[in-house]
Image (cartoon, rainbow, N blue to C red):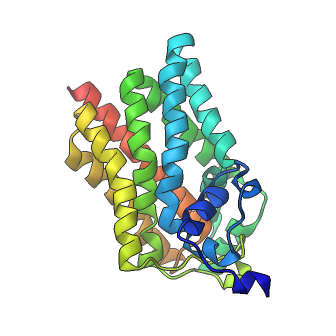
Amino acid sequence: MEETSREVKWFDGPWAALIFFTRLPFWRIYQPPQSSYRSVVEYWPLAGWLTGGAMAAMLYFGSMVLPWAVAVVAAIVVRLLITGALHEDGLADFMDGFGGGGNRERILAIMKDSHIGTYGVLGLILYMMLLGTTLYSLPPMVAALTVLGADPFSKMVSSQLINMLPYARREEEAKNKTVYRKPSLAAGLSLTVQGLFPIALMIWMTGISWYLVIAVPALVMYFLYLLMLHKIQGYTGDCCGAVCLLVELAVYLVACYQYFAN
């Protein structure tokens, strides 16, 4: 009764997103009502400001006192500690499901299984190799700015899945027992600002071509959307996490291409 009677405050949604998408103890300070967690995707890029900012700081300042390769690995570790490898877990489940599954029911069952399979292991290894080498290939300042822009942007792009596809399972079957609500027009505009502002700053400060850094990740997201539409006719939380990481990786690949092409 107390939960249902609580008035939802303007900061409940952003605070719930920080609790949901990170492992930092924000819940010790304030616990928003359970209903706020249905709107966490609307503030997903805001959580990316935190994770991307922490990773960018480690890249830039770490490069001043550590070998560049060590700073890159340390930055990746920092983000994994903050997020609890939430999206990496989704990527592994996504790779296992779509790699090893056949029909819709089989894919969903594999993704819900807590055990990791061959496709998940290979997917994580290849993802981490590409993530580390792309960041290592960039100068510290460019790498830091690119991470700062790519993290929120990839979350903004990936959040469109919940507008484009229905949830693939019943709500009671969801891993976190929560199905995200579709953003309203105002929430969609907020999402756009959260995701585009950091990457616009990155483009301005690095000189990376805006059309490539927008178009290539969008194409990656669209291809994954078509895959999910064809295979499972919907999305899951694991799908959102996987798309987020792969879209972000596409930004880093574009940054590498631009840096070496120039």
- Specify the quadrant of the image occupied by residue 139: top left
Q: Is residue 243 visible?
A: no
Residue 94, position as x, y percentages in the image = 60, 61
- Specify the quadrant of the image occupied by residue 252: top left
At x 37% / y 75%, what residue is drawn? 186
Residue 11, position as x, y percentages in the image = 55, 65
Q: How many marks?
A: 0
Residue 62, position as x, y percentages in the image = 55, 20
Which is more toward the observer, 144 or 249? Answer: 144
Which is more toward the observer, 66 or 188? Answer: 188
At x 70% / y 50%, what residue is drawn? 23
Q: Is residue 1 visible?
A: yes
At x 45% / y 30%, what residue is drawn? 135
Residue 1, position as x, y percentages in the image = 79, 88
On the rendered image, what quadrant is the C terminus found in?
top left
At x 56% / y 80%, what residue is drawn? 167
Which is more toward the observer, 124 or 186? Answer: 186
Instruction: Determine whether 97 is above or below 23 in the image.
Output: below
Instruction: Determine whether 194 is above or below 208 in the image.
Output: below
Residue 255 falls left or right of residue 33: left
Instruction: Determine whether 44 is above or below 75 in the image.
Output: below
- Specify the quadrant of the image occupied by residue 37: bottom right
